[in-house]
Image (cartoon, rainbow, N blue to C red):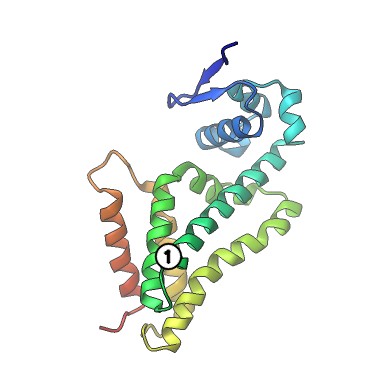
Amino acid sequence: MSTAIDRSPEGGPIPRGGGREAIAAAAREVFEQRGYHGASIRDIAKRAGLSLSALYYWHPSKQDLLAALIEENTLDYFRRCDEALASAGEDPAERLRALVRATVEYRVQRQTESNISSREWRNLEPAHEERLAGLRTKASTIWSDIVDAGVEQGTFRCEHPADARRSAQAACNAIAQWYDPSGPVTMEELVDHYTRIVMRIVDLRP
């Protein structure tokens, strides 16, 4: 028996009965297009080719679905960072370059996921926000550990490491909000550009 296929507005297939994966794909599209408050759980189920009861089997509510997406997106980003840093060695400058590359590539390749995580965080209910707060802390710590180590070793000369970390992290994260993959700037050019920006922010010693 052939599998019925729904088509997303972008043309991507969402197989009926795809369960959790189909729901996640549909929710990402609907949240990206309409925002959390503009999306309905019925819209998401329809986009996934599933019944409401099937969706509720996986996620009790739209709020639970949003929290699950943000958690999944953030953990996926952490995996990218871990892989990049595992082969970067101990030099803070090389580790920061690896982190910038991992972040820029993730924000370009996972724009929808990145935008949902940043824009819709404010719509998490307190219980979910409290449960996921540690992810935000870890995301900052990945950057601050490297910047702080570089300052301690004299590799980075920025006078205010915390401000430097915030600026560098925010600049890289914001790429997802404006980058146009069909535009003139390639991802590799973007990585090079932002690596140089971040190194200026931390004041890399020549």
Query: Which quarter of the figure is the C terminus placed in?
Result: bottom left
SS at circle 1: helix
How many numbered marks appear? Answer: 1
For label 1, the crowd category at 10 Å Cα-Cα, with few meaning under 14, some 14 to 19 and many 20 or more, is: many
Q: Vertically, is 182 above or below 4?
A: below
Name the residue located 61 percent from the left edge and 31 percent from the top edge: 39
Residue 141, percent from left and from top? 55, 71
Query: Which amino acid type corresponds to the residue marked 1 in the rendered image?
Result: Leu
Judged left or right of residue 159, residue 63 is: right
Query: Which quarter of the figure is the N terminus placed in?
Result: top right
**In the image as oriented, which residue stretches furthest toward the top?**
1
**Picture quadrant of residue 131:** bottom right
Residue 36, percent from left and from top? 61, 38
Name the residue located 33 percent from the left edge and 42 percent from the top edge: 180
Judged left or right of residue 60, residue 102 is: left
Q: Nearer the viewer, residue 204 or 14?
A: 14
Name the residue located 33 percent from the left edge and 80 percent from the top edge: 203
Q: Vertically, is 53 above or below 119?
A: above
Judged left or right of residue 8, residue 185 is: left
Q: Which residue is mark 1?
A: 99
Q: Nearer the viewer, residue 129 or 11?
A: 11
Name the residue located 42 percent from the left edge and 88 percent from the top edge: 153
Q: Nearer the viewer, residue 161 or 11?
A: 11
Q: Vertically, is 25 above or below 79?
A: above
Residue 14, percent from left and from top? 54, 25
Residue 13, percent from left and from top? 49, 24
